Image (cartoon, rainbow, N blue to C red):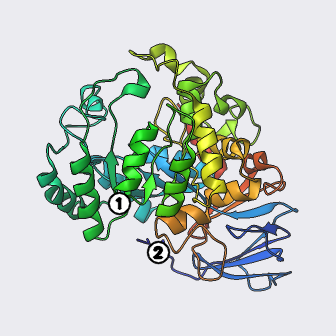
Amino acid sequence: MTDGASSATSTSHTTVIRGVRVFDGTKPLDANSVLIRDGVVAEVGTDLSAHHATETVEGAGGTLLPGLIDSHTHTLRVAELEQALAFGVTTELDMFCVPELLEPLRGAAASRDDVADIRSAGIGASVPGGHPTQLVEMGVYPPFPTLASDDEAPGFVADRVSEGSDYLKILIEDGSTMGWGGQPRLDARTVSALSASAHARGLRVLAHISTQADAYQAVATGVHGLAHLFVDQPPEPEFVHKAAESGIFAVPTITIFELLHGTARRETAYVDHPRLWPYLDPVVREALLSDWREHLPWQPPHWASAEHTRRAARLLHQAGVPVLAGTDVAHPRAAHGLSLHAELAALVDAGLSPTEALTAATRAPADAFGLTDRGRITPGSRADLLLVAGDPTSDITATGEITGIWRRGQRFDRDAYQAGLNTP
């Protein structure tokens, strides 16, 4: 599904970005300039003329990338879409939201160019009392529908289609890897029925998993992608083979598992970055610097490890499984936009090259989710763009050296955004 919407403009607006490296979503191009006209990339080439341009941007040897796509978010407020865009994330792929919260997010994304775009699974499939129904008790979500048996699957999927869900998320989770085991969960027959019903309606299907056994089950039922990788065991060669054979994609969400099952938090290396910290809400910054685990009413088990996730990501990537960059971002445990830069570094540490990690946040998710108008820099694609100093195809941390952001061809005013953060 693609957007295609653009801001209404009374006159044609043309921008030339010159003197840059151009990464097209897969590889660096033999080009140094990009022409944007009326919200789309009109031309990619060498020394393009700025004679008739409304605006000329001198890139000073930086790198122009497609706007970043976060393939696993939990978005509740329009302000989170604005924050995401301030860090170069032009599209968020939300993995659970109820219609009353999702409607204003979609409205803002359709009508404004100063917020990131959004796609959403809407309400994910779970059982009564299953994950994430505990978030209702915590006040995060209002009550939402669940299903108790496989014969309810067609109706559940039909309801999500009528609500406008862009894909279906199935939650296969008993809480064991989080330290709250014994939570009710979907049985295998219901998972299969949900997947079949979604396929019949043309919906992509993602499975939330956290154990290797659940990953095996998800692959066997024909899901398109895994919304996490597992933390309970090292990846088995048989699983890697079955995953590659099935044609799935995987969103490892390494940084969130490092937070829960590791000893360090990657985001703390970014909160003082000179081109990032001024655009981080002070409340969000404080949350990132705190030990979130201290406030948990439960503690993850000692046998769960983020190293299993990293190793699985590396082996799946080596086997040809598309690996997508996603953060599982939700306040206060992570920061919209900022956390994706940390996830890119985590993917490189897991074994992807910097170029492959960039693809994991641009062309790969666009392809996996059918977003044919973004994730690439090519004539006709949406001008969702990120300009950074340096060369992130050789040093992934250069994605944080942000000097320009465009959504649908409109440059995001980071100065105005920063001023708003500092206004009481």
Q: How many marks?
A: 2
Kindly check if marks 1 and 2 are in contact, taking CB atoms under 8 A apart as contact: no
Query: Which three-letter amino acid code belongs to the residue tagged 2?
Result: Ala
- Residue 283 in picture, x, y percent from top left: 54, 27
Instruction: Tell me where residue 53 sits by quadrant.
Output: bottom right
Locate residue 57 relative to residue 284 in the image: left or right: right
| Residue assigned mark 2 | 8
Q: Is residue 25 above or below residue 82?
A: below
Q: Nearer the viewer, residue 33 or 291?
A: 291
Q: Residue at x 33, y 23 (%)?
A: 181
As drawn, which residue projects farthest toward the left? 151
Disc 2 element: loop
Locate residue 70 relative to residue 351 in the image: left or right: left
Mark number, residue 167: 1
Q: Nearer the viewer, residue 46 or 11?
A: 46
Q: Residue at x 24, y 26 (%)?
A: 137
As drawn, which residue projects farthest toward the front? 238
Query: Which three-letter amino acid code belongs to the residue tagged 1?
Result: Tyr
